[in-house]
Image: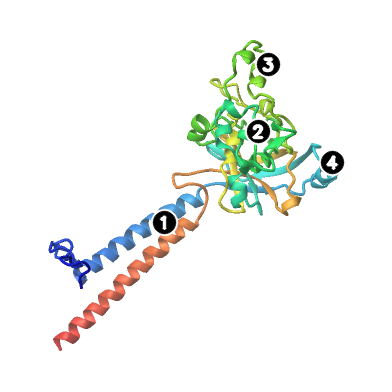
Amino acid sequence: MSGEPGTSNLPANTAFKQQRLPAWQPVLTAKNVLPTFIVIGITFLGLGIALLITSNGLYEQTKEYTDCTNGSGDACSTQLENSIGSECLCDLSVTIEQDIQPPVYFYYKLTNFYQNHRLYVKSRDNSQLNGNTDVVNDASKLSKDCNPYREIDGKPIAPCGAIANSLFNDTFTLENESNNPINMDKSNIAWKTDHTTKFNNPVANATCKADPATEFQCSFGNSEKPPFWQKPIYEVSDIVETSSEQSENGYENQALEVWMRTAAFPTFRKLYAISYEPVSKGNYTLKVKYNYPTSGFKGTKSFVIAQVGWAGGKNPFLGIAYIVVGCLSLVAAVALFFVHKYSSKKAQD
């Protein structure tokens, strides 16, 4: 059919529009299908065995401390509920069954904490975290996604949002039987792109630079700390035991950067520190400054000691999955071989 006189709805008579372009279609025969299944099966089986052996050779131990008690025998969780903002100290015994070669990774683990909730994930202002000086004294320029943790009495909260407000703030010290602490380095726990690009402190203006003693504090302007924080952002720091860097303050705080990268599942763990020295087998004492409440979301807290190999942490799932796929591929190859032989014999008869 045609619309106006002299027009046609037919496509142009070209190879592309008339679908006459040359095409290649694989011909599946026993000679190319069977070797493919065999190669896939052997490759996946070998890789799966390597992954499983590597995973089983890594050390990992998880120590839950949700209900740990202080020196008086009182539960720290109860003390925290009765006196918000109080600090509770508790000691736990940890036995390491084997020598651990460096690097040794220390994590904190939370359960039933839904960092993947849409409103929670959006509750931040990336411009503020990047050091934008326009929002230092003007709460109206902060993202509305930060509500209800956007401002206090007209003053901007630094950093704003629910993610920063719920920052994990328990601290750990691991001591051996001689009461010597294990070195925990926090200088390289965040993603490099986060630490060097996404998180920057605001630049101090001329007024702030006039007094070097208060220059850093002044650069954050007339801001307020998040309601659940014990200190303002310019006093929150991680002392780093390295020769090249003495401290990390403000937004350029790697513990904050790790927390702000939200987890995909309600059970997750985040890197707390790394030890670049061997950790010997034996009995240790884990000293915990218990500050973070979990009863509100009915979750648990744990401290994790782990090694990481070339394929990641200790997790047998990936190795088992590769082995299963490899075995299924080999079984399929054997089954197809016998089907091919049976079909060929029947065709000859």
Task: Locate residue 83: give its quadrant.
Answer: top right
Cα distance between the residues tagged 1 and 2: 56 Å
Q: Nearer the viewer, mark 2 or mark 4?
A: 2
The C terminus, quarter of image: bottom left
Name the disc covering residue 139, or none.
2
* Mark 4 Cα-neighbour bin, 10 Å: few <14, some 14–19, many ≥20: few
Q: Which residue is mark 1?
A: 49
Residue, disc 3: 214
Foreground mark, 1 or 4? 4
Q: CA distance from mark 1 to mark 4?
A: 52 Å
Contact, mark 1 vs mark 2 (Cβ under 8 Å): no
| Mark 1 or mark 4: whose residue is earlier in sequence | 1
Residue at image coords 79%, 36%: 87
Residue drawn at x 58%, y 32% is 128
Front residue (pair 205, 248) = 205
- Crowdedness of circle 1 by 10 Å Cα count: few (<14), some, many (20+)? some
Give, as a three-letter code, the residue at label 2.
Answer: Ala
Residue at the disc numbered 4: 83
- Disc 4 versus disc 3: nearer the observer: 3
Q: Mark 3 or 1 closer to N-term? A: 1
State the image coordinates of residue 192 (x, y, percent, origin top left): 49, 33
Say what amino acid the circle numbered 1 marks: Ile
Q: Are marks 2 and 4 in contact (CB under 8 Å)?
A: no
Looking at the image, which residue is at 60% across and 13% down? 206
Q: CA distance from mark 3 to mark 1?
A: 58 Å
Above or below, 296 relative to 70: below
Q: Residues within 10 Å of mark 2 (few under 14, many from 20)?
A: many
Question: Which mark sits nearer the N-terminus, 1 or 2?
Answer: 1
Judged by depth in the image, the label closer to the viewer, 3 or 1, is 3
Quadrant of residue 95 in the image?
Answer: top right
